[in-house]
Amino acid sequence: MAHIVLAGATGYLGRYLAQQFYRDGHQLGLLLRDEKKLERLQIPNHYVVKTDFGNSDHLLHEIPSCNIVVSCLGITKQQDGLSYDDVDYAMNARLLDFAKNSQAKQFMYISVLHAEKMQNRLCQAKTKFTRQLKSSNIDYRIIRPSGFFSDIHNMLQQCDGKCLPILGNGQNSLNPIHGQDLAQFCAEALREKERELNIGGPLTYTQKELAQLIQKHCKKPTRIFQLGEHLQAAAKFICRLAPERWTGSAEFILEASSTDMATKSYGDIKLEDFLAHSQSNSNCFSSSEFLANKYSANDNSENDNSKDDHATNLQEANDV
């Protein structure tokens, strides 16, 4: 088994990665800024290094030599006055320096599908780092997911009882993936020879179909409306001019929505099951409950309650 150092372990995807690597028997080190978020992981036999990712020499001093570094560092919400360039690029660049200096054999980075083709500030920072990673001498894996179930759930919460926009003609498609399935894919990718992998969930939707699915699971009457291409272009222009902390997320969503985001399918957790479960269960499972339900479902595959392993902590947090 490998010695893996995971950065961003308390973020949405990071929690699933930590659980997956633990189940696979790897020795696990967790890099994080906020130790308060660590309780939800409840993973034994790991060590923690509290860091602001500001100095690769500090990391080298604090962390034993490792085989693999995995990073899902990235901003999901603008806070702390940090920019995409501060986190998605600079912090990952310092983590890469640590990996090279510690003679790690592999660096895995979780990016975004088609990031290199998009011009928003989030994707520009991610692309800037992936170029640096690919030009280094370290063996690398770049994982590019289509989107997360949690993003769809956030959209449901924000639009419930209000208006749900379809951007453009509504025909661009995507196949978002659950964090648990993506973590399993990442664990398998550590052993693959292919260095860059695009991945999505098991089912593909057009934006129109996705809007109808979200509307179906809203608890209050919700109206779907179409935002024409001219209005979408104007919104993108305004977002680009505004400060990143105000419009960074909207800028990314607008551009991603005008891009076909469907790719290779993976996993067996279906978005509709996830939305149905999340809407009928107000309390989210902790990590220990998540693992207990997963193993229970595996041992009792015909049990009607096996869908419980689809639950997740839906509270979004910065991966850093």
Image (cartoon, helix red, strand yellow):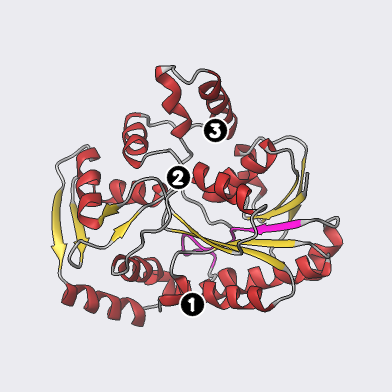
Q: Is residue 64 left or right of residue 314?
A: right
* Residue type marked 2: His
Q: Against 267, is 225 above or below? A: below
Out of 183 and 266, give the one closest to the viewer.
266
Local crowd size for mark 1, using a 10 Å CA cut-off: few (<14), some (14–19), many (≥20): some
Measured in 3D between alpha carbons, the distance from the residue under mark 2 to the one under mark 3, in whole angstroms, is 16 Å
Q: Against 110, is 93 above or below? A: below
| Quadrant in which the N terminus is drawn | top right
Q: What is the span of residues highlighted in magenta in the rendered image?
A: 68-80
Measured in 3D between alpha carbons, the distance from the residue under mark 2 to the one under mark 1, in whole angstroms, is 25 Å
Q: Earlier in the sequence, mark 2 or mark 1?
A: 1
Measuring 54% from the left and 31% from the top, which residue is drawn there?
290
User: Residue under circle 2?
Assistant: 178
Measured in 3D between alpha carbons, the distance from the residue under mark 1 to the one under mark 3, in whole angstroms, is 34 Å
The answer to whether the residues at label 2 and label 3 have Cβ atoms under 8 Å apart is: no
Q: Secondary structure at mark 2?
A: loop
Q: Residue 210: image x %, image y %?
A: 25, 50
Residue 190 visible to an observer of this rendering? yes
Q: For the residues carrying marks 2 and 3, which lies nearer the camera in this image?
A: 2
* Residue type marked 1: Gln
Q: Main secondary structure of the magenta part?
A: loop
User: Residue under circle 3?
Assistant: 286
